[in-house]
Amino acid sequence: MLNVLTPNEVLQLIKDEFNEIEEVFEYVRIDAAVGRVLAEDIVAEEFVPDFNRSTVDGYAVRAEDTFGCSESIPAILSICGEVKMGERASFELLPETCCYVPTGGEVPVGADSCVMIEFVEDYGDGTVGIYKPAAPGQNMIFRGDDVRPGKELMLKGRTLTFSDTGALAALGKAEVRVKRKIKTAVISTGDELVPCNETPGPGKIRDVNSSMLTAMLHTYGAEPVSFDIVPDEEEELEKVLNKALVDCDMVLISGGSSVGTKDATARVIEKTGQLLMHGIAAKPGKPTILGKCGNKPVFGLPGHPVAAYFVSKLYVLPAMDRLIGRGNRPYSVTAFLSENVAANDGRELYISVRLENNDGRLIAHPVRTKSGLITALAGTDGYFCIERDCEGLTQGAEVQVFVNEAY
Amino acid sequence: MLNVLTPNEVLQLIKDEFNEIEEVFEYVRIDAAVGRVLAEDIVAEEFVPDFNRSTVDGYAVRAEDTFGCSESIPAILSICGEVKMGERASFELLPETCCYVPTGGEVPVGADSCVMIEFVEDYGDGTVGIYKPAAPGQNMIFRGDDVRPGKELMLKGRTLTFSDTGALAALGKAEVRVKRKIKTAVISTGDELVPCNETPGPGKIRDVNSSMLTAMLHTYGAEPVSFDIVPDEEEELEKVLNKALVDCDMVLISGGSSVGTKDATARVIEKTGQLLMHGIAAKPGKPTILGKCGNKPVFGLPGHPVAAYFVSKLYVLPAMDRLIGRGNRPYSVTAFLSENVAANDGRELYISVRLENNDGRLIAHPVRTKSGLITALAGTDGYFCIERDCEGLTQGAEVQVFVNEAY
């Protein structure tokens, strides 16, 4: 018997039934951490910068010594020294004096601003003329301007980007504590399947889902664990599922999820754990199963690769994010339909698109296909969703396209 | 002397001066190919599917045998066999007969449609009753419906996504020819720099750019080649640049690009090759250098990490795409400003944001900072650009945010 849920009910079910895997983490070098999920809050422990710095090549001055100067009446100051890059400014700047400081160099005690070198003339006799008055604080960064000890910079659960890498480096964190990757079993079932590098004999087809789901898991920072194709034998599937559950945090079984003679996945999940749902009111994706064995999610994905693609993005990814404690971030881009699209029979409908950048305006070309597998997957850039109560969209209509993750 | 270009002029210069690196490729397994750039056109060589298939669990029929049937007057047909999953349907379906076919199973010759099992009653005497008429072609995929030999599916230069992996698997391509990764040297210069895992002494700061640029290159599918920090000595930098040019396709030198006493990068590029530009009319990013040594791009990036971040996204990435023959795809998301933002002094201005998902509406919180390095990098989700002729944006204004690449 099918227990069919709406997409939102499925997402709620995932939230309710599964929890973040407790404190399993590892340390990785920050330059290899992009896409990984932070397992610690990042809190500054020092002042950055740790000294007052100039933001220009120029002269450190006391601002008041330059007040009222102009191109015709320069302020004349004595040069009291020069700050070298990467060295301490070990003297104090006295009134009516100045010193050269390169961009990023330390501004000596006593100085409160820097004048760009363009507005300074070196007279060659130990004095310079300043042609533009400085305001206090001008062209300087003060100690701790960027961060001070105790400032919270990134929270646990954040997916690291390469700009975060920069911040971590500045804080002196060469390694960072991240969540261990979610180990996920990839199992394809079906007497009709042959490995994708073989030529299918009569009545056979290639196993597409193993490769696609493995690639998906790599893309989203999980660790795929591959299994051989399982024939349509319930005992065999049960054996493989139990083997997968020993090591893996999550299991994806694809194929065998239609309510036909071959429907073994649901029964095997019921034997091993608990069947949470059987069927989603969305197209594609209807014959999707979700179970719970121990505390681990076990998905029965549709055998049809296009349906498996959408289900993995829409439900497997949120489940993975739940286990790893990551906030899911479904960004979309605005695009405009190249043609009319008819709506569906009261179920949410997902449609793949190719995107074309028409002088800054994104055009979404729906990929229409009668269960076409390759045509619906090859060369698409993302997908959009037609809500269940929508009666169709016309050419030029604005749609929100969820784009693929490669760049 | 600065040769300052506008952002668009820089992009044009990159296009004009550099070419795709000729035919350097490798073969990778498709499940590890996401993010890689195709080095071959993908053209179908077979029919997919290779036989007529049912899209439902049900009975294959001749549609005309079911015309006019209804719930009250079923069409009575004899069962002439059963198709097993993954086996050839080795018989022909004769008039007034039908046979069971599972989802994905082969539809025998003679049948032209399938009736879902829900509309069929098995009388147990070798006959069934069909309660719903079938239209020819209904619930079937015909041989070659998806693709036929010769169909172009993906073109050279495409960045592979995991849905592409699915299509490649369906075509039997377990490995795919992709462009070799662009080997890119990462060189930081500056007497003030210490490695990021060290505590900086007086006047020193940590080398942020090496880690950040390495992470950036990993993220975009390039191969970073790391060098030790180079002191501000022209001969030393020249030596390292020449060493890098032996093996690498592109060189990133950061630091030393301000017009000050330490400005060695431009001179070293001029000695080794040709200086193409010195300065971009944008903020941040002004003190950016681009040179050409042999046919290889050599960037002098600003030492300031925030500026280096933007320059690497805005110009280094397009240069890499040029070398690898990839069309750049700058997707943006629509978001709404959380506060007023003042515009700038006639230069394009780039502002980092944190994004907040407010019930489906993305709110962009500008990260305001006075050259703050960590605060501008840590925890940001992307950036938007204020055009040079814009006088500022008000709270609630719509902006296009270019989001980071991690998910």
Image (spheres, coloured by chain):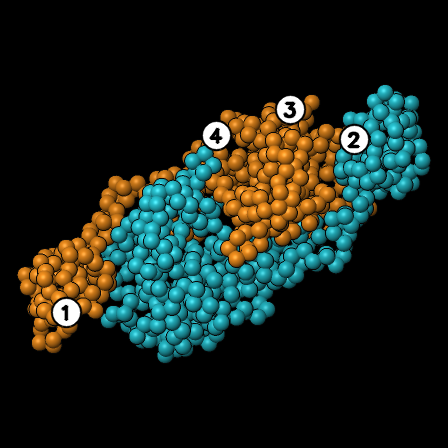
Chain colours: A orange, B cyan
Q: In the rendered structure, the residue with mark 4 lies on which chain?
A: A
Q: In the rendered structure, the residue with mark 3 lies on which chain?
A: A
Question: For this rendering, which residue is in front, A4 or B3?
Answer: B3
Q: Where does the N terminus of chain B fall, quadrant-wise? A: bottom left
- Point out the frontmost of discs 1 and 2: 1
Question: For this rendering, which residue is in front, B134 or A126?
Answer: B134
Who's the residue at 94% across and 37% down the image? B94
Instruction: Using the image, tell me which numbered label, if any, was put on residue B133.
Output: none
The residue type indicated by label 1 comes to Glu
The residue type indicated by label 4 comes to Asn
Distance (Cα) linking label 3 and label 2: 19 Å
Distance (Cα) linking label 2 and label 4: 39 Å
Q: In the rendered structure, the residue with mark 1 lies on which chain?
A: A
Q: Which residue is mark 3?
A: A3
The answer to whether the residue labelled 1 contacts the one labelled 2, judged by CB atoms less than 8 Å apart, is no
Q: Which residue is mark 4?
A: A19
